[in-house]
Amino acid sequence: MELKWLKDYIALVDHGSFSKAAEARFVTQPAFSRRIRSLENWLGVSLVDRDKYPTTLTPAGEAFAEHARQLISQTYAVRNQMRDIAAAREQLVIVAQHALAVSFFPPWMKTLEALTNGALVKVESGNLHDNVEAFLSGNGDFLLCYASEDIFSQLQRDDVESMQVGVDELVPVSAVDTDGEPVHAATEGGVLKLLGHPGESYFGRLLARECLPHLPADLSVHLACENALSEALKSLVLSGYGMAWLPKSLITKELEHGELVRLVPPLKSLDLSIRLYRLKKPACDAADQFWNYLQELYNGGE
């Protein structure tokens, strides 16, 4: 059972249609439908009568709606109770994308440790969609992620503020052969073996818009594998299974040691902005103080 399934179901009950509920939950309709199916499979009952239109709940679905609301309320009540118990030591909860939690966060936090005033720093990593959902639900003080306003617009809200805390680059790379040449490269009239990010992921959407459509017409792209984890794609690239676009911060050592090589045009690289987000009403004094320190550091107090 996942909390987001319950919230999905309540959205379906409130909006009365899969398409409107999916839009309200910032997911595609197929992904939303799969999550409702997962909830039904976990419960062992059908909640929606799929033989009727418009969307109609089964008797079990009608009965479960109120239980779902209560479970959501109880879950947040328990969370708040646990936070109260832990309040003897203030905490900073940073929700971060997997790649940033591995590559960017450790050296960044080491530099900023003195700014936390002894607060416990907790990092919760996941994919960007779940991270944004958790952050906007109040399940973290900060969201650390790669940012693009036109791709992830739900963070463009009046009650959310952000600052740039770093930069990165999404670069096309391949393992090398014994002569130091790329195992997989974009050769004229050839086949490019691609290890890709899922289409609904942040990197997947970015590449689909900025890179893949601009490849030469005579270059055939063979998608060999998809994985939402950049670290997993990195391992596959190192094994010579294919090429991939990866954050430069994640592969700095491998590039320096010659284990990976950066591929040349027509495969282009993309500049990335790393941003830290927070809700304008901070959950605790420590989070507010940390944010103010960062503003002084990055914006000169502006």
Image: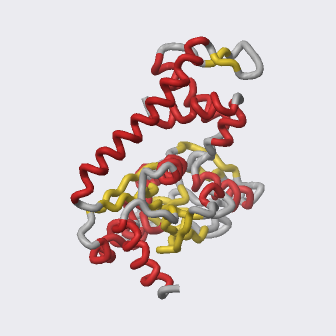
Residue 176 shows in this picture: no
Residue drawn 30% across and 62% down?
121
Residue 83 falls left or right of residue 247:
left
Q: Position of residue 285 (x, y in %)?
A: 36, 67
Answer above or below: position of 291 versus 32. below
Relative to the observer, which residue lies in front, 265 or 42?
42
Relative to the observer, which residue lies in front, 180 or 109?
109
Residue 213 shows in this picture: yes
Q: Position of residue 130 (x, y in %)?
A: 50, 47
Specify the quadrant of the image occupied by residue 47: top right
Specify the quadrant of the image occupied by residue 58: top right
Residue 293 falls left or right of residue 279:
left
Q: How is the image coloured?
A: secondary structure
Residue drawn 23% across and 60% down?
89
Q: Position of residue 167 (x, y in %)?
A: 51, 73
Q: How many marks?
A: 0
Relative to the observer, which residue lies in front, 146 or 265?
146
Specify the quadrant of the image occupied by residue 290: bottom left
Answer above or below: position of 72 versus 227. above
Residue drawn 36% across and 70% down?
257
Quadrant of the drawing holding the N terminus: top left
Residue drawn 73% across and 56% down?
213
Residue 189 falls left or right of residue 270:
right
Answer above or below: position of 297 versus 142. below
Q: Position of residue 295 (x, y in %)?
A: 46, 79
